[in-house]
Image (cartoon, helix red, strand yellow):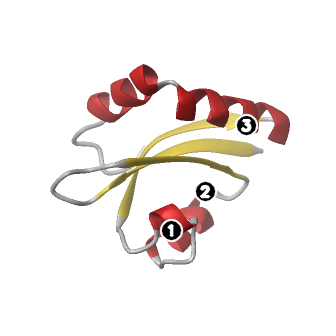
Amino acid sequence: MFYVYMLKSKSIKPITYVGYTSNIKKRITLHNSGKGAKFTRGRKWVLIYKEKFKSKKEAISREYYIKNNRTLRNKIKNENFNTSSV
């Protein structure tokens, strides 16, 4: 199984990050320890959204769609404004 996920930074002006993985708990731990994607280093993150897929290809396709659809990304971020995890 693969997951597409969205993280929100724990800062005064939060930003989001979208990615995919086969092990969501391990991936979030990496992001929060400074060993995740370069963009996520130096920030603390909270999981606000995830979707499950059977194939890597489906997950990558969905990740690309969410990353490039600012309207959808903002909708997810705003709907989950007070959610610490999904």
| Total marks in image | 3
The alpha-carbon separation of the residues under discs 2 and 3 comes to 13 Å
Q: Nearer the viewer, mark 2 or mark 3?
A: 3
Quadrant into which the C terminus falls: top left
Q: Is residue 48 visible?
A: yes
Disc 3: CA contacts within 10 A as few (<14), some (14-19) or many (>=20)? many
Look at label 3 and name its amino acid: Ala
Image-quadrant location for residue 57: top right
Assign a secondary structure to mark 2.
helix
Residue identified by numbered label 1: 31
For the residues labelled 2 and 1, say whether their Cβ atoms are less than 8 Å apart. no
Q: Is residue 55 visible?
A: no
Residue drawn where x is 81% and y is 35% of the image:
54
The alpha-carbon separation of the residues under discs 1 and 3 comes to 19 Å
Q: Which tag, 2 or 3, sits closer to the chain's start?
A: 2
Look at label 2 and name its amino acid: Ile
Q: Tell me residue 21's x, y (percent).
A: 69, 53
Residue identified by numbered label 2: 24
Q: Tell me residue 37's x, y (percent).
A: 58, 65
Assign a secondary structure to mark 1.
helix
For the residues labelled 1 and 3, say whether their Cβ atoms are less than 8 Å apart. no
* Outermost top residue: 71
As drawn, 6 above or below 38: above
Residue drawn where x is 60% and y is 48% of the image:
19
Q: Which tag, 1 or 3, sits closer to the chain's start?
A: 1
Assign a secondary structure to mark 3.
helix
User: 25 left or right of 11?
Assistant: right
Residue identified by numbered label 3: 59
Residue drawn where x is 78% and y is 44% of the image:
1
Q: Tell me residue 64's x, y (percent).
A: 65, 33
The alpha-carbon separation of the residues under discs 2 and 1 comes to 11 Å
